């Protein structure tokens, strides 16, 4: 039987599967052994060995279902695109970018801002000023030159923040509207 559902619903289904797997594992563990002199508590269902065999098969089937769902989600993420701030990427690429690239870029931009702030304080302490490399003609020896526009630095930081804030909403929207079959 093929099921057509949204990614959001499929992700919820995976959580249900995970709970069922945990429950079945607990059940199997609880009934795996018993003292020989005790009556088999599952005798009415065919005996512990038969019930455990069925439950082990059920575990396998549930795990395979989760793999199928995740594969379909991955395929949808690899083909569905999102455009943010003029940049178009697949969902898979946006997820990778958010996890691997964005934190590094955020930290780098923050370190640049901190470096400029420290340079400004250092210049003030020496009786100078922080000057842009374009205004280099009217400088004093105590001035410190910044080789990047602070406006550009701020723009890049704001752009990164806007993309990150918008990205979560766009991903949620796509998850709620893109359908998969499994």
Image (cartoon, rainbow, N blue to C red):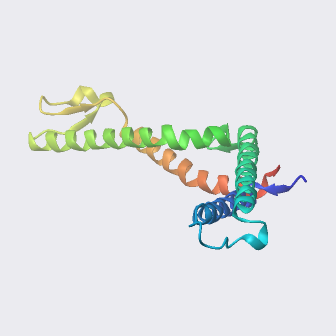
What residue do we see at 24% from left, 31% from top?
Answer: 145
Q: Is residue 56 left or right of residue 133?
A: right
Q: Tell which residue pokes out farthest to the left in this image.
A: 126
**What is the x, y in percent for residue 177?**
78, 56
Q: Is residue 18 above or below residue 137?
A: below
User: Quadrant of residue 142 in the image?
Assistant: top left
Hey, which quadrant is residue 15 in on the image? bottom right
Q: In the picture provided, is 141 more to the left or to the right than 14?
A: left
Query: Residue 101 vs residue 94: left or right?
Result: left
Question: Who's the residue at 70% across and 50% down the image?
Answer: 63
Q: Is residue 71 above or below residue 139?
A: below
Is 56 situated above or below 79? Answer: below
Q: Position of residue 70 (x, y in %)?
A: 70, 47
Residue sitting at 55 percent across and 54 percent down? 165
Number of numbered discs overlaid on the protein picture? 0
Task: Identify which residue, 33 or 141, lies in the foreground.
Answer: 33
**Seen from this angle, which residue lies furthest front?**
37
The extreme top residue here reads 137
Q: Is residue 160 left or right of residue 150?
A: right
Residues 45 and 102: in front is: 45
**Looking at the image, which residue is at 58% across and 62% down?**
33
* Residue 81 percent location from the top left of the image: 72, 41
- 148, above or below 33, in the image: above
| Residue 4 horizontal/vertical position (percent) | 86, 55
Between residue 56 and residue 78, name the one nearer to us: 56
């Amino acid at each position: 039987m093929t099921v057509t559902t949204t990614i959001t619903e499929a992700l919820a289904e995976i959580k249900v599967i995970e709970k069922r797997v945990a429950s079945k594992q607990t059940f199997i563990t609880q009934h795996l052994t018993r003292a020989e002199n005790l009556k088999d508590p599952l005798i009415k269902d065919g005996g512990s060995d038969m019930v455990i065999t069925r439950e082990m098969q059920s575990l396998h089937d549930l795990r395979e279902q989760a793999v199928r769902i995740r594969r379909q989600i991955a395929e949808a993420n690899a083909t569905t695109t999102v455009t943010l701030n003029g940049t178009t990427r697949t969902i898979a690429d946006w997820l990778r970018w958010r996890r691997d690239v964005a934190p590094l870029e955020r930290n780098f931009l923050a370190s640049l801002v901190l470096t400029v702030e420290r340079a400004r304080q250092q210049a003030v302490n020496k009786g100078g000023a922080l000057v842009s490399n374009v205004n280099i003609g009217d400088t004093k020896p105590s001035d410190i030159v910044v080789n990047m526009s602070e406006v550009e630095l701020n723009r890049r930081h704001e752009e990164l923040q806007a993309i990150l804030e918008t990205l979560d909403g766009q991903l949620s929207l796509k998850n709620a509207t893109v359908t998969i079959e499994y």
